[in-house]
Image (cartoon, rainbow, N blue to C red):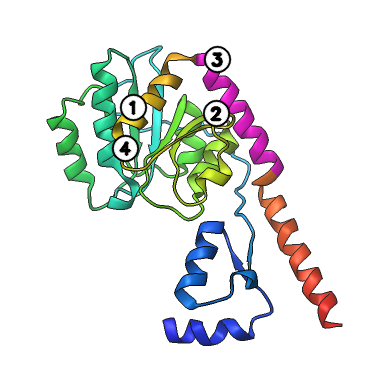
Amino acid sequence: HRVIERSLWRIADALVAVSHSQAEAISRYHRIPRERIRVIWNGVNEPVRLSSAIPFERPLPPGVPIIASVSTLITQKGLGHLLEAARLILDSGERFVIVVAGDGPLHQKLIARAAELGLDECVRFIGWVPQAVNRLLPACDIFVQSSLWEAMSIVVLEAMAVGKAMVVTAVGENPRVVIQGETGLLVPPADPAALARALTTVIRDPELRTRLGNAARASYLSQFTVAHMATEYEKLYLELAGAST
């Protein structure tokens, strides 16, 4: 595949990456001049809020901030660090519930680790939730992503579309997509203490949650809709068509 891709990129009229970090990685891997690669950000559909029940084994405590994590349960997503952060938050006396939606090879190990850390009451693993963006995210107060690496994270865009306060790691395109302190909070990857501090900040401040969520929603509408993505590709197609005439 590497040989084929290194041969074919030379004959393409345009090369597109979905993030600057991906463009840099592709450029290095295939030895492509960076100026040959365009970046067009992904867009996501406007959420359609569904009221169908979410499979919680136990009712969520009323009035407690709900934090949602939506991902495949693999090493990349850094969920072990999220559990360590949860223990630190719990030790500080804060009340909260983290709902982890998703499945994967680490599912049982993460459940065991949460039990080992004494997190049974404040961390819920609910498995894979179909249409989580329409069912789970609207029901939560905060979105968290603890990934160790990403390219252009779709679920971050979905959280923005729903207008949620976000705490995400500064990996991949996240530092360009999320404006620190304005549309969300960025923390270093693999740093449970930093993650705990940022989550504690938004747990304690409902007004901050509202402000971050509203700003994230506005950013989504201006930059990350499917219509905006399609317009950017249309501009590229028209540019290429004009160059060929």
Q: Secondary structure at mark 3?
A: helix
In primary-sequence order, the first of circles 3 and 4 is 4
Give how far across and how far down residue 83 sits, in percent: 26, 33
Q: Secondary structure at mark 4?
A: loop
Q: From what the image shows, is residue 43 above or below residue 62?
A: below
Q: CA distance from mark 1 to mark 3?
A: 19 Å
**Which labelled disc corresponds to residue 113?**
none
In primary-sequence order, the first of circles 2 and 3 is 2
- The residue depicted at 80 percent of the width and 70 percent of the height is 239
What range of the chain is rendered magenta? 206-222
**Which labelled disc corresponds to residue 181?**
2
Give how far across and how far down residue 164 sits, in percent: 53, 30
Which tag is nearer the camera, tag 4 or tag 1?
Answer: 4
Using residue 80 as the reference point, say whether residue 154 is left or right of it.
right
Q: Kindly identify the amino acid type of the residue bearing the numbered disc 4.
A: Asp
Using residue 125 as the reference point, say whether residue 62 is left or right of it.
right
The answer to whether residue 19 is visible is no
- The residue depicted at 34 percent of the width and 47 percent of the height is 77
Q: CA distance from mark 1 to mark 2?
A: 16 Å
Tag 1 near tag 2, CB within 8 Å:
no
How would you rate the neighbour count of disc 4 (Cα within 10 Å): few for under 14, some for 14-19, many for 20 or more? some
Q: Kindly identify the amino acid type of the residue bearing the numbered disc 2.
A: Gly
Look at mark 1 in the image and give the residue it sits on: 196
- The residue depicted at 52 percent of the width and 37 percent of the height is 159
Tag 1 near tag 3, CB within 8 Å:
no
Q: Kindly identify the amino acid type of the residue bearing the numbered disc 1.
A: Ala
